[in-house]
């Protein structure tokens, strides 16, 4: 059976049976949290760590959605052999009688047929074309911009356009495989090792993809890139949060999330000026080679070291934190930590220092199922809003950048709400508001298009805030023993939402605002269900399964 790595200690009290989980820890067992408070909950050492961890977060932000530009559709129309020449443009007067329109734009894959009853040679005039008969393009295409994507280089137009959406699907399938795999390996072999390995391998995969000679090699490397690189953000997120005191976790999560939003905004601007997809990929992936410096500069998670009985390394790291933060760290506290850790490891019900999936689901099955659904909803809506932004009026690059920028106020809003009303209510409020805004977008678009666009970007803002809370919340409702694995598991289940999201465009021919209604439906459902999560505001991170189960006691229960 697959095991999940135990990353923190457990209780003093002996287990009463083979199926039991650990009882809640006592105040004596909160040694590490007490030491973190003593040596600085968010001091210079943690700030330096965060600066380092910006690299994997920025890389993951780029790589998870770069296909929007590398595999983007370029406006095109049929090349009209009777009228087009080498110097003709996308917009020409003769299109009025040679090319039909669709939704106010020139049809991309059809043209009017040349009349068969003409006397003499046909020429470029109205009488040469039969506007009652449409035929597929038979002489290539004229492009509406100078943008170079795999569509223009590999000739992916019209009947083959499914290949472009397939890139996004394969990207998310790679994340589905890579996120739980990376989470398991991070819990097994350490956060630092996985960050270095994932960053370097992802860089190699991306640079190799920029040299892809044809479509299927590009697609294979897209999948490989996400398998090895999709774990960068969740692993960096947990590595950052695990060495921060309880009172500063919200600040820590805010810094991480802001770092994720800015690169998306930047990527839209980069794509606007680097219109060649090969150059674009090389610029994005080369910086990932800097993950090599983590070998010397980035410390391993103290909680993970203690779970692996590597007390000497944990002590060294804590002493270094105290020194950099200019705080005193009494030796007797370190000794007490080691003794407490050894007792808890000895008495753990996790065989060999690991919890099995069976143990986790027996203790937290309902919570895990609910978490997976919430992640599905968030990825469906968040990615859907980013993808559909390209269909808004105006430049797709600027619209994409604006959706990235709207994440910043969304993150700050989420931080305020978490401190004000707690995790559960903040998460529920953001999802509910996003759903309401999506309905408002559909209601106002025809009459007030500018108002509708504003509401759309506000929906993106609240969706981002909700996602930030979810990432943070998930890292608190599972024990450290399997936190990285369970965060990665829930996130990977959420990938089904991002796989489905690109396909929502298929609903538009039936009803223009069908995607908005679908997103709103899931948003309303999610906003109600998240209230069944336990509240974790200002509580220490749970170490064992018993401590995670005990979080539910904070929820008022009705008497039967």
Image (cartoon, helix red, strand yellow):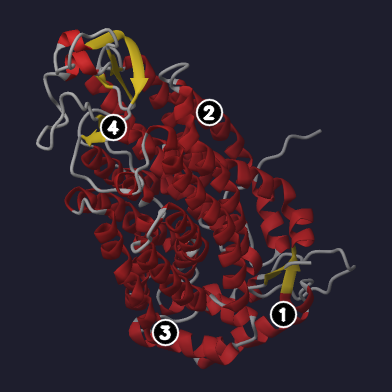
Horizontal placement of 122 versus 296: left or right? left
Please state which of the two labelled residues, at mark 2 or mark 3, is closer to the viewer: 3
The tag earlier along the polypeptide, 1 or 2, is: 1
Q: How far across and how far down the image is residue 381, in percent?
A: 46, 36
The tag earlier along the polypeptide, 3 or 1, is: 3
Mark 1 residue element = helix
Please state which of the two labelled residues, at mark 1 or mark 4, is closer to the viewer: 4
Q: Which residue is mark 4?
A: 139
Please state which of the two labelled residues, at mark 4 or mark 3, is closer to the viewer: 4
The tag earlier along the polypeptide, 2 or 4, is: 4
In the image, residue 53 sits, relative to residue 416, either above or below, namely below
Query: Residue visible at 65% across and 86% down?
Result: 309
Circle 1: is it few (<14), some (14-19), or many (20+) Cα within 10 Å? Answer: many
In the image, residue 492 sits, relative to residue 386, either above or below, namely below
| Image quadrant where one finds the C terminus | top right
Mark 2 residue element = helix
Q: How far across and how far down the image is residue 403, in percent?
A: 30, 41
Query: Residue visible at 71% across and 39% down?
Result: 557
Asked if the residue under mark 3 is in contact with the one under mark 2, i.e. CB atoms within 8 Å, the reply is no
The tag earlier along the polypeptide, 1 or 4, is: 4
Circle 2: is it few (<14), some (14-19), or many (20+) Cα within 10 Å? Answer: some
In the image, residue 59 sits, relative to residue 109, either above or below, namely below
Circle 4: is it few (<14), some (14-19), or many (20+) Cα within 10 Å? Answer: few
Query: Residue visible at 40% across and 60% down?
Result: 60
Q: Residue furthest front?
A: 120
Q: In 3D space, how far apart are the residues under numbered discs 2 and 3 (Cα atoms)? A: 45 Å
Query: Residue visible at 46% across and 37% down?
Result: 162
| Image quadrant where one finds the N terminus | bottom right
Q: Which residue is mark 1?
A: 345
Q: In 3D space, how far apart are the residues under numbered discs 2 and 4 (Cα atoms)? A: 49 Å
Q: How far across and how far down the image is residue 57, in percent?
A: 38, 62
In the rendering, which numbered label is found on residue 295?
3
């Amino acid at each position: 059976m697959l095991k999940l790595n135990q990353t923190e200690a457990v209780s003093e009290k002996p287990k009463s049976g083979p199926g039991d989980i650990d009882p809640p820890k006592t105040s004596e067992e909160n040694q590490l949290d007490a030491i973190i408070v003593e040596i600085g909950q968010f001091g210079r050492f943690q700030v330096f760590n965060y600066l380092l961890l910006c690299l994997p977060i920025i890389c993951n932000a780029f790589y998870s959605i770069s296909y929007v530009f590398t595999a983007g559709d370029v406006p095109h129309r049929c090349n009209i052999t009777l009228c087009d020449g080498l110097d003709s443009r996308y917009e020409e007067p003769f299109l009025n009688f040679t090319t039909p329109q669709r939704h106010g734009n020139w049809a991309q894959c059809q043209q009017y047929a040349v009349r068969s009853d003409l006397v003499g040679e046909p020429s470029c005039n109205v009488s040469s074309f039969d506007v009652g008969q449409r035929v597929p393009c038979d002489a290539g295409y004229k492009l509406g911009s100078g943008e170079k994507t795999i569509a223009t280089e590999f000739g992916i137009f019209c009947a083959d356009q499914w290949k472009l959406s397939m890139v996004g699907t394969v990207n998310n399938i790679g994340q589905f495989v890579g996120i739980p795999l990376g989470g398991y390996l991070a819990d097994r072999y350490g956060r630092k090792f996985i960050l270095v390995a994932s960053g370097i391998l992802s860089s190699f995969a991306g640079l190799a993809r920029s040299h892809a000679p044809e479509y299927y090699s590009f697609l294979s490397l897209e999948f490989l890139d996400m398998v090895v690189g999709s774990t960068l953000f969740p692993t960096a997120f947990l590595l950052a949060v695990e060495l921060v005191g309880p009172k500063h976790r919200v600040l820590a999560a805010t810094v991480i999330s802001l770092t994720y939003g800015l690169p998306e905004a930047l990527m839209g601007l980069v794509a606007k000026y680097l219109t060649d997809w090969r150059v674009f990929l090389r610029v994005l992936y080369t910086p990932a080679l800097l993950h090599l410096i983590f070998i010397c500069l980035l410390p391993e998670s103290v909680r993970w070291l203690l779970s692996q009985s590597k007390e000497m390394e944990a002590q060294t790291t804590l002493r270094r934190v105290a020194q950099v933060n200019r705080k005193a760290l009494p030796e007797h506290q370190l000794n007490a930590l080691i003794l407490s850790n050894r007792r808890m490891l000895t008495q753990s019900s996790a065989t060999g220092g690991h919890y099995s999936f069976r143990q986790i689901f027996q203790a937290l099955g309902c919570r895990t199922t609910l978490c997976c659904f919430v992640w599905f909803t968030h990825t469906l809506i968040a990615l859907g809003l980013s993808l559909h932004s390209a269909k808004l009026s105006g430049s797709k690059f600027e619209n994409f950048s604006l959706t990235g920028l709207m994440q910043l106020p969304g993150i700050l809003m989420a931080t305020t709400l978490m401190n004000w009303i707690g995790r559960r209510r903040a998460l529920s409020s953001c999802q509910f508001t996003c759903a309401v805004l999506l309905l408002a977008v559909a209601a106002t678009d025809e009459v007030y298009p500018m108002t509708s666009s504003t509401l759309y970007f506000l929906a993106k803002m609240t969706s981002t805030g909700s996602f930030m809370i979810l990432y943070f919340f998930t890292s608190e409702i599972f024990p450290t023993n399997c936190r990285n694995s369970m965060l990665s598991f829930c996130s990977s289940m959420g990938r089904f939402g991002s796989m489905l999201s690109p396909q929502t465009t298929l609903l538009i021919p039936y009803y223009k605002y069908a995607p908005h209604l679908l997103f709103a439906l899931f948003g309303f459902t999610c906003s109600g269900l998240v209230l069944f999560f336990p509240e974790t505001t200002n509580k220490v991170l749970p170490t064992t399964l018993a401590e995670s189960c005990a979080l539910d006691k904070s929820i008022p229960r009705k008497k039967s």
